[in-house]
Image: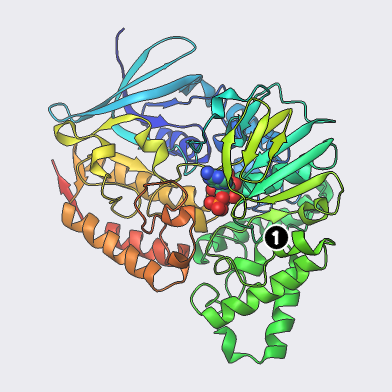
Amino acid sequence: MAEEKYDAVIVGGGFGGIYHLIHLRKLGLNCKLIEAGSDFGGTWYWNRYPGARVDSDIPIYEFSLPELWKGWTWTERFPGWKELQAYFAYVGDKLDLRKHCRFDSTVKSAHWDDDLHIWHVTSDGKEGLYKASGRHLIVCTGFASKPYIPELKGLGTFQGPCVHTGRWPKEGIETTGKKVGIIGTGASGVQVIQEIGPHAQHLTIFQRTPNLALAMGQYSVNEQVQAHFRPVYEQIYQKLPTTFGGLQFDFIHRPAMGDTAEQREAVFQELWSLGGFQFWLGNYEDIIIDKACNDEVYAFWRKKVCERVKDPKKRELLAPLVPPHPFGCKRPCLEQYFYEIFNQDNVDLVDINASPILEITPKGVRTTKEEYEFDVLVLATGFDTYVGGFTQMDLRGLNGQTIRDHWEDGVTTYLGMTTDNFPNLYFVYGPQGPTAFCNGPTCVELQGSWIVSTIDYLRQNGITKFNPTVQAARAYKKHNNELSDATLLSKAKSWYMGANIPGKKLEAYNYTGGVARYKLEIAEEIERGYPGFERG
Ligand code: N01
């Protein structure tokens, strides 16, 4: 088939892909967006498991474009996946974006052509093979697009539905009145557990590490309330990239131990009462640096959780006396009635450290202690974060080098948006960006605006090949590692450090200096005339 020619090809139709489609088109570029799902939404297209819900509160989990937020009304402080899908459909309609997209088509390969200075992209799907080329390739597959399914013996033998949370079928799965087993207690596990728990006949949860989940503080919102706050939306959006987490609030800029114990207790109590991530990314600024501060935060969190769980054994498994890892160094999530679920007689919590899973059987799960029988088995086992979205494609840069080979000994990026040996390739919300420590749309808009400005610069200067130097990428990685090494992050086995995938290189996959600092660093690259790049 003939290859369609574009200025830019964009992979992925979530916040990142849509941002680039909107803004590169405003620059006059002819773009094609290719998306594996049937519509926009990205993570919210795929994560449609019961209870899937964002944990950034309104109005920060949306585009900051006035033509979009002025016409949109949410119904909850933390919207659920159905409402998020409706929001993406609204964006697509309002800006008439779908005509630039190929949906139901998965990008299989993207190869750099060093003679023509373009990318050749091939995708496949509902309408067959598709080929497009573009001078610029923007990968917006998000940090969690490749589900991780552990290699459990006998997995394929289970006779009932067995589903990963990130691939929940559109038609849903009946869990009411069923015996359900759930493996994993990350953010996805916590949400699906609290949703399925109340109506399952029996729910068995296999936990390896407790989630240090925070109270969401959910409430309904109406148009009247939002109309009242819209006049300050611009102010809020301007503030987001000046904070650590791209949020409406920031860390308390003083060390915890400079306050008295009574003052700290009062601070913790106030943050707790606000709900959401205030207790984490709005806490003392040394929360993930100073162990003494971190221990106190954990002790406060534990006290709150223990008040809600009646059974002492379950309580100790969910909120152990000894912290399983430093608080906030493995992603906490937001919960609504997760801990109350464990007070139901029909809910069991299995500690798979004490009795590991031996195999999946046709009837259920066999541990070293017993076999559990289920109608439905849910794998809430996470994702090959940061890099899975890249390595699942045949992505080849200079000399045909694959991204898999390029990153085999660890990830190198420059500024968390480009990587050496892959000219004219850009990405957002991926490795070595603020990604997991940042509100999604804030990260996408900050990185996206840098990429769009850079592409504009390249066009204005007739530069057709733009590639970060190996030295610049190495120096950036060193800097990122130093930022991470100054924290307690490496003390937790988490996907932040690649510890969730057996054999994955353990290193800092996230930029740890905070969004405000990152913003200054990437702006400096532009101000200094892109010293980290070679031009072709
Ligand atoms: O994945 P996870 P997730 N045997 O990797 C367990 C975002 N997100 O999908 O902790 C048994 O956090 C694993 O155990 P352990 C959010 O950023 C956001 O839940 O490694 N268990 C863990 O409990 C989030 O952080 C939202 O010991 C195994 C679980 O599976 C990120 O996505 C909602 C196992 C995986 O947890 C990922 O969250 C959902 C094995 N072999 C997701 N392998 C919201 O915005 C893994 N586990 C609300």
Relative horizontal placement of residue 10, taking residue 252 as reference (left or right):
left
Q: Is residue 317 above or below residue 157?
A: below
Which quarter of the image is occupied by the C terminus? top left
Q: Tell me what residue is drawn at x 29 percent, y 57 percent.
A: 526
Q: How many marks?
A: 1
Residue at horizontal 68 percent and vertical 76 percent from the top: 299
State left or right for residue 338 relative to residue 183.
Answer: right
SS at circle 1:
helix
Which of the two residues, 526 or 197, is positioned nearer the viewer here?
A: 197
The residue carrying mark 1 is 318
Amino acid of disc 1:
Leu
Residue sticking out furthest to the top: 1
Q: Residue 314: percent from the left, percent from the top?
A: 76, 59
Residue 405 lies, in percent from the top left, at: 24, 39
Asked whether residue 527 appears in the rendered view, the answer is no
Within-10-Å neighbours for mark 1: few <14, some 14–19, many 20+: many
Q: Does residue 75 lie above or below 243 as drawn?
A: above
In-front residue for pair 111/189: 189
